[in-house]
Amino acid sequence: MSLDDVAAALEARLPGRVSRDASVAELTTYRVGGPAAVLVRVGDEAALLALASVVACSKPPVLLIGRGSNLLVAETGFHGVAVVLEDEFAMIDVDSDANLVRAGGAVPLPMLARRAAAAGVGGLEFFVGIPGSVGGAVRMNAGGHGRETADVLRRAWVLDLLAGTDAIVEARDGDALDLSYRHSNVDAMHVVVHAEFAGESDDVAKCEERIAEIVRWRRENQPGGSNAGSVFRNPPGDSAGRLIDEAGLKGLRVGGAVVSEKHANFFQAEPEATADDVGRLVDTVRARVADATGVHLVTELRMIGFEDLDPNPDVGASRGEGEDTT
């Protein structure tokens, strides 16, 4: 089945929810990149099952897009089906009596943190510093400020798109998700439908004070503008930002992309930048750090369409093209 046939099948099952040659740049924090051949906006489980029925039969490349805060798509675009969750998947329910928060896969993590804090559910404040989605947090075990998703995730509900008409929403606890540093067994064809997080009872004012402190820290230590947060994972026992800084690469520029002077593991896309500028900067920094230190940095940034530049073994994951984790 050609991609045009896939798009037609999706349009028949999900009228008004499918776009062709849709801008991906508008869906990412880098604000650069080529179009997606097909973009599907999915608002409920029935629509997700309809999507699965088409994907399982035709097996096109699939890209799940969360908040776009960890995604870079090459200027050539994505020649497959990009999927965005919305509507029912953007809902939050806070049970302050049980100190549980249940959130859809499309919920922004800062919103999750603030809603929990306002209800006196502590322990989730660190999410305010991660500009991604709940689904992305589960997939990559996102973390920051000394905590990670595995510390607070009770369970997640996941659907395998390749199961087609037999697809079910399956509950998985932390052990079943195989969570480790920036890793889970949720792959490119799995959709995190929603997740449940366990906090602890706390004073609202104290929760909100911790939220404010994390926001202040980010403003003081991390750049704003068009970027996707940390480009590289921290190697064991070290910091990617420190290695880049020690190699003298702050301010290094490729076209309109530049290594931030404020935080060396953040790469900025200036107004004239292209996605390919950013991709070449990633490749250049990785090579220079390897030459200077012998350490081969691995991207945390999801790079789609950069196979010639990005040798990471996990990019273009099995059973699909990849997923924007946040």
Image (cartoon, rainbow, N blue to C red):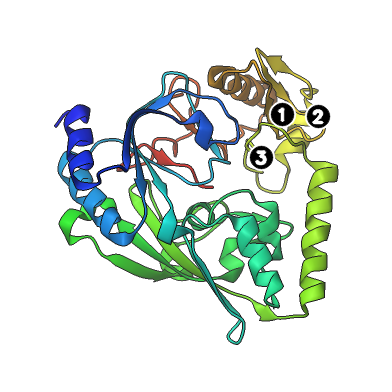
Indicate whether 126 appears above or below 80. below
Asked which secondary structure carries label 2, the reply is: helix
| Left or right position of 265 against 212 | left
Indicate whether 108 appears above or below 101. above
Q: Nearer the viewer, mark 3 or mark 1?
A: 3
Query: How far separated are the C-alphas under marks 1 and 2?
Result: 9 Å
Indicate which disc, 1 or 2, sits on the residue closer to the N terminus.
2
Residue bearing the label numbered 1: 293
Whether residue 302 is visible, yes or no, is: no
Question: What residue lies at 54% left-to-right and 36% top-to-bottom?
Answer: 28
- Report the number of numbered marks: 3
Query: How far separated are the C-alphas under marks 3 and 1?
Result: 23 Å
Residue bearing the label numbered 2: 246
Nearest to the observer: residue 17 or residue 313: 17
Q: Nearer the viewer, mark 1 or mark 2?
A: 2
Residue bearing the label numbered 3: 229
Question: What residue lies at 61% left-to-right and 63% top-to-bottom?
Answer: 112
Asked which secondary structure carries label 1, the reply is: helix
| The N terminus lies in quadrant | top left
| Residue at the far bottom in the pictured view | 97
Classify residue 10 by image quadrant: top left
The answer to whether the residues at label 1 and label 2 have Cβ atoms under 8 Å apart is yes
**Where is residue 164 drawn, in percent x and y?**
19, 53
